[in-house]
Amino acid sequence: MRYRVLGTTHAFHDDGTPVAVGGARLRALLTALALRPGRTVPVGVLVGEVWDGDPPADGVAALQALIGRLRRTLGHKAVASTDGGYRLCAAEDDVDAHRFTRLAAEGTRALASGDPVKASALLADALALWQGPALADLPDRASEATRWETRREEARRTGLAAALALGRADEVLPELTALCDEFPLDERLRALRIRALRDVGRPAEALAVYEEIRTTLADRLGADPGPELRALHGELLVSVPASGNRAAVPAAPSRPSGLHHGP
């Protein structure tokens, strides 16, 4: 069996045929188990997650009944009973969230080792697993889902870095521009956008992006850009005069890096 929790919870036979998992409680139970494939999840944890802190009078019996329904849906051998809990009989790679984690980590390592082709393919496969908000069927999903969404955004940034390494700056520049608008304080995204603008021959615009993030960080956080952005700024100051556009954006005043909380 394969399981999806990056979006509405689904189960699939190995040949890809979907299994109908009906009912919000049943999908919540499957989500809670699928997050920990092959590991025993204590009864108390399952009751708390499925009923979101408001269990029925006999939560243990209610959970047993729900486990019975899940076994009838997936097959009796899909869920094992253990001392004090239940276990989804699945490997981590059978669950899309854990498969995403593996592919994203492999893609990140490939880029770090100088193989952007492999990195781009792995990260694209990882991101394609997302079919909606993470853990959509878990009643109290906020904190756990946020962690998964953060991992998704990090994989997306690394995929964009791989695309730039492959000379696809024109292709990814619109996405980078939109992401910078969505996350105005994200220095890594700004660095990627600056690189993309530089690579497509628009260094003056790249300098403008640097000045924008420098001002934003100073105004909102009292901080200066980090080392990566400052290094890019230095490279741009060298390259812009050759294009005759250096005067388009004044060089930012130099300040020590770090937070400034007062005079």
Image (tube, rainbow, N blue to C red):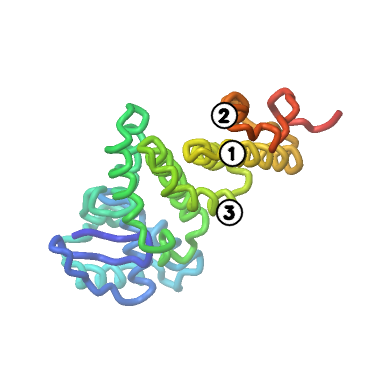
Q: Amino acid at mark 1?
A: Ala
Which residue is more in the foreground, 241 or 16? Answer: 241
Quadrant where the image shows the N terminus: bottom left
Q: Is the residue under label 2 in contact with that under label 1 (CB below 8 Å)?
A: yes
For residue 50, side relative to residue 230 (left or right):
left
Q: Quadrant of residue 223?
A: top right
Instruction: Answer above or below: position of 33 versus 120.
Output: below
For label 3, the SS is helix
Q: Which residue: 34% across, 69% down?
A: 27
Of the image marks 2 and 3, the number of the one nearer the N terminus: 3
Disc 1/disc 2 C-alpha distance (Å) = 9 Å
User: Which is closer to the viewer, label 1 or label 2?
Assistant: 1
**C-alpha separation, residue under disc 2 versus residue under disc 3:** 22 Å
The amino acid at mark 3 is Glu
Question: Is the residue marked by circle 3 packed among few (<14), some (14-19), or many (20+) residues within 10 Å?
Answer: few
In-image side of 188 versus 112 (left or right): right
Q: Compared to 25, does 258 lie above or below?
A: above
Query: Marks 1/3: CA distance?
Result: 18 Å
> Residue at image x 79%, y 33%?
261
Tell me: residue 94, above or below residue 200.
below
Q: Residues within 10 Å of mark 2 (few under 14, many from 20)?
A: some
